[in-house]
Image (spheres, helix red, strand yellow):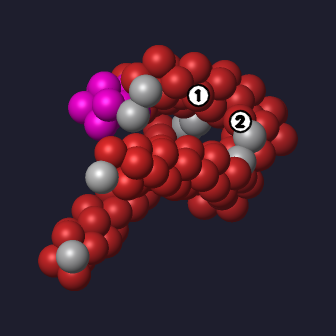
Amino acid sequence: MKKLIVLSVMLMAIFSFATAQQQQRQMGTPEERAKRETDRLTELLKLTADQKAKIQAVELDLAKQMDAKRQKAQGDREAIRAVVQEIQKLREEKYKPVLTADQFKKYLEDREKRQKEREQRQGQGQRNN
């Protein structure tokens, strides 16, 4: 019986580790995430070349900070949520001087829209479980 319990715990640990690695690969490196977000914002906000370079630098810095802080949080959902909120605040502070007033307004509207869509998807997932 003890062997069965130990085996079950080991399998769960292996599965958790494999899932975490797969999720990290899907998210990509900080450089990939920064490029993906910069490209998305360039299209959405019609960024100039100078703005694009500045946003790319901001995104890379924030992606690296996010990885480091998530690592420290070690899967604690509340701690990760706090990290995400902190990074979002920093993002807004750093975007504001780079973007025009209209671009910043459009960015905030897009962020709200994406947040609502994410909440809807999460709500549907919870109902399906």
Is mark 1 in CB contact (under 8 Å) with mark 2? yes
Toward which corner of the image does residue 114 lie, by quadrant?
bottom left
Toward which corner of the image does residue 22 lie, by quadrant?
bottom right
Please give the count of numbered marks on the rendered protein: 2
Percent x, y of residue 7: 45, 51
Does the stretch in magenta take in 84? yes
Give the SS element for disc 2: helix
Percent x, y of residue 39: 73, 54
Q: Residue furthest right?
A: 49
**Mark 1 crowd level (few <14, some 14–19, many ≥20, 10 Å Cα):** some
Q: Is residue 45 above or below residue 64?
A: below
Q: Residue at x 40, y 48 (%)?
A: 3
Q: Residue at x 39, y 34 (%)?
A: 75
Q: Residue at x 48, y 46 (%)?
A: 10
Q: Is residue 116 above or below residue 103?
A: below
- Residues 69 and 112: in front is 69
Q: Residue at x 21, y 76 (%)?
A: 129
**Mark 2 crowd level (few <14, some 14–19, many ≥20, 10 Å Cα):** some
In this rendering, would 50 be left or right of 103? right
In this rendering, would 30 be left or right of 68? right
In this rendering, would 34 be left or right of 69? right
* Residue receiving disc 1: 67
Q: Residue furthest bottom?
A: 128
Does the stretch in magenta take in 126? no
Give the SS element for disc 1: helix
* Residue receiving disc 2: 30
In the image, the segment drawn in magenta is 76-85
* Circle 1: residue type: Asp
Q: Residue furthest left?
A: 127
